[in-house]
Amino acid sequence: MLKYLKNTILDRELLHKFFKKLEKGARMTDENKSETEVETQDIQEKYYELLEELALKDEEITQLKEDLEKQENETQEYIALSQRLQADFENFKKITDKQNKEIIKFANENIIKEFLDCYEDFGRALEIENDKDLQEGVELIYNKFKDILTKEGVEEIPAKGEKFDLNKHEALMVQKSDDVENGYVIDELMKGYMYKDKVLKYSKVIVCKK
């Protein structure tokens, strides 16, 4: 009997300890669950914070890309402008060089024009019958003038018997002629001259018109 009671008491104590352990285990499970929920909540909060930071970074990156594209476009515009200015400068330089060459080429034009009057006076003087020695002297000077003009690129414009050319001849008169074709020069009243590839003085002519 005593042995039976003793065993029963021991069983009750074991059961009490068992339930205590279950209760303790249950409390520990609740506590662990609470701690896990807290940790999960903290992780979620940190996760949302990171998402917000990432969103801000994305906005910054997008803005940087837009700024970079804008700068690239501006750079291309500057390059295009620079190329246009370079092309304009090259064209200006070509035009200026051409003008300078023209200026140099025809630098003596005005002097030669005045010189031609003297030259023609000598030619007319040779046509007058006068002292032979004087005529020879004038002819010598005339020929020297002619050589100088030729060296400078001055040439007489062919006129008599040539087809009338508005670019070289100036018609002072028109008349009929049986010996000359229509539109051709009958006679030359005043000589004309070319200075290199430019008309220095137009030939004054009579043109045949039928």
Image (cartoon, rainbow, N blue to C red):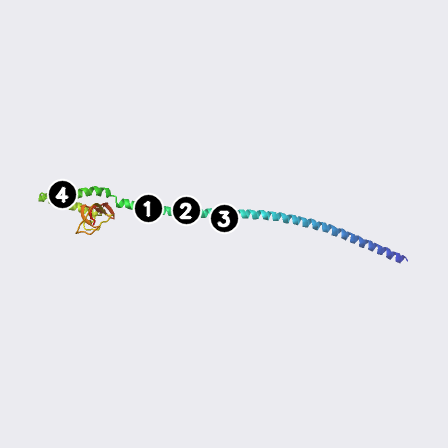
Categorize mark 3 by other alpha carbons within 10 Å: few (<14), some (14-19), many (20+): few
Amino acid type of the residue that numbered disc 1 sits on in the rendered structure = Ile
Amino acid type of the residue that numbered disc 4 sits on in the rendered structure = Ala
Query: Residue 82 bears which disc, if any?
Result: 2
Where disc 3 sits, the SS reads helix
The residue that mark 3 highlights is: 69
Query: Residue 125 bears which disc, if any?
Result: 4
Categorize mark 4 by other alpha carbons within 10 Å: few (<14), some (14-19), many (20+): some
Q: How far apart are marks 1 and 2 (CA)?
A: 20 Å
68 or 209, which lies in front?
A: 209
Q: In which quarter of the image is residue 189?
A: top left
- Name which of mark 4 and mark 2 comes first in the sequence: 2
Q: Position of residue 17 (x, y in %)?
A: 81, 54
Amino acid type of the residue that numbered disc 2 sits on in the rendered structure = Ser
Q: Distance between the residues labelled 1 and 3?
A: 39 Å
Between marks 1 and 3 in the image, the one whose residue lies nearer the viewer: 1
Q: Are marks 4 and 2 in contact (CB under 8 Å)?
A: no
Q: Residue at the spot x=30%, y=45% of the render? A: 99
